[in-house]
């Protein structure tokens, strides 16, 4: 019988450095993930970091219009969007074995663009420990070293000093602004988003060793060709 990792190769991916580990989201991770969200994500005094205020949905387990049901479709959609022309990797972030947040990678037309988009969030109780910077460094390094990406892009709402600081520490540089719409609990609002990007030349790597497993099988699954993968 095939293993789950052989059925769905992204599950074999593991990226680790020091106390932090990233792996593709599994259903067994959901209870811990829900508890992290319940503990809060948005830091006081900073702008809402997401396009939609999903993290503020009423907690109502088992109800179709409450959290976590309102987020399950999105988490499962990321797992289902997995083909060479477009893919998403929703990576659970653990620190010392405990779920602390999520780190996402998204690409459209990657074989031609060699560009990925990064997005992340961290439970409020886990802010200030350097985890946000390290988890971003891990996925950016993975994109460059294992997927042969040439550019990683991201963005944050103007005024979000915490996201801006993480981006600078990883090596992202400002790449223009645009007007976007946020769907808040009080209605839609227009805000300024700062776009940022990082290349292998500006990337600031972790200071300690990064350990990666499952990269070769993932490359084959995503159609990212590299000599020697077999």
Image (tube, rainbow, N blue to C red):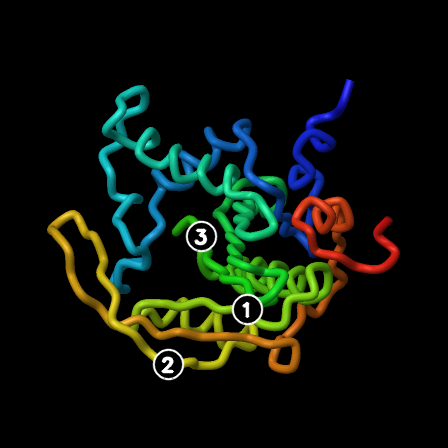
Asked whether disc 1 touches disc 2, contact meaning CB atoms under 8 Å apart, the reply is no
Give me the disc on residue 140.
none
Q: Secondary structure at mark 1?
A: strand
Quarter of the image where one finds residue 204: bottom right
Viewer-nearest of discs 3 and 1: 1
Is disc 1 surrounded by few (<14), some (14 to 19) or many (20+) residues within 10 Å? many
Along the polypeptide, which appears first: circle 3 or circle 2? 3
Left or right, 196 with reference to 145 = left
Alpha carbon separation for disc pair 3 and 1: 20 Å
According to the picture, the residue beneath numbered tag 3 turns out to be 122
Q: Position of residue 126 (x, y in %)?
A: 46, 52
Alpha carbon separation for disc pair 3 and 2: 25 Å
Along the polypeptide, which appears first: circle 1 or circle 2? 1
Whether residue 159 appears in this view of the structure is no
The residue shown at (26%, 22%) is: 63
Left or right, 121 with reference to 84 = left
Q: Position of residue 220 (x, y in %)?
A: 74, 47
Q: Position of residue 10 (x, y in %)?
A: 65, 41
Along the viewing direction, whichever of 179 and 226 lies nearer the viewer? 226
Q: Secondary structure at mark 2?
A: strand
Alpha carbon separation for disc pair 1 and 2: 15 Å
Is disc 3 surrounded by few (<14), some (14 to 19) or many (20+) residues within 10 Å? many
Along the viewing direction, whichever of 16 and 188 lies nearer the viewer? 188
The residue shown at (31%, 34%) is: 70
According to the picture, the residue beneath numbered tag 2 turns out to be 176
Q: Up-down: is 183 above or below 1? A: below
Q: Position of residue 58 (x, y in %)?
A: 23, 34
According to the picture, the residue beneath numbered tag 1 turns out to be 152
Quarter of the image where one finds residue 157: bottom left
């Amino acid at each position: 019988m095939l293993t789950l990792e052989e059925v769905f190769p992204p599950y074999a991916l593991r990226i680790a450095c020091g106390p932090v580990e990233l792996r593709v989201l599994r259903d067994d991770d959901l209870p811990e993930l829900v508890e992290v969200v319940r503990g809060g994500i948005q830091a006081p005094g900073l702008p809402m970091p997401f396009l939609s205020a999903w993290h503020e949905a009423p907690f109502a387990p088992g109800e179709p219009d409450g959290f976590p049901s309102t987020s399950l479709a999105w988490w499962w959609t990321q797992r289902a969007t997995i083909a060479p022309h477009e893919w998403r990797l929703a990576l659970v972030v653990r620190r010392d074995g405990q779920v602390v947040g999520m780190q996402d990678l998204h690409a459209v037309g990657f074989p031609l663009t060699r560009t990925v988009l990064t997005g992340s969030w961290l439970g409020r109780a886990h802010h200030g420990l350097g985890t946000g910077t390290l988890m971003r460094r891990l996925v950016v390094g993975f994109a460059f070293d294992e997927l042969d990406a040439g550019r990683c892009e991201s963005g944050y709402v103007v005024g979000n000093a915490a996201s801006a600081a993480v981006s600078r520490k990883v090596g992202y540089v400002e790449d223009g602004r645009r007007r976007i719409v946020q769907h808040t609990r009080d209605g839609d609002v227009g805000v300024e988003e700062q776009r940022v990007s990082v290349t292998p030349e500006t990337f600031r790597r972790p200071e300690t060793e990064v350990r990666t497993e499952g990269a070769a099988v993932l490359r084959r699954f995503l159609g990212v060709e590299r000599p020697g993968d077999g």
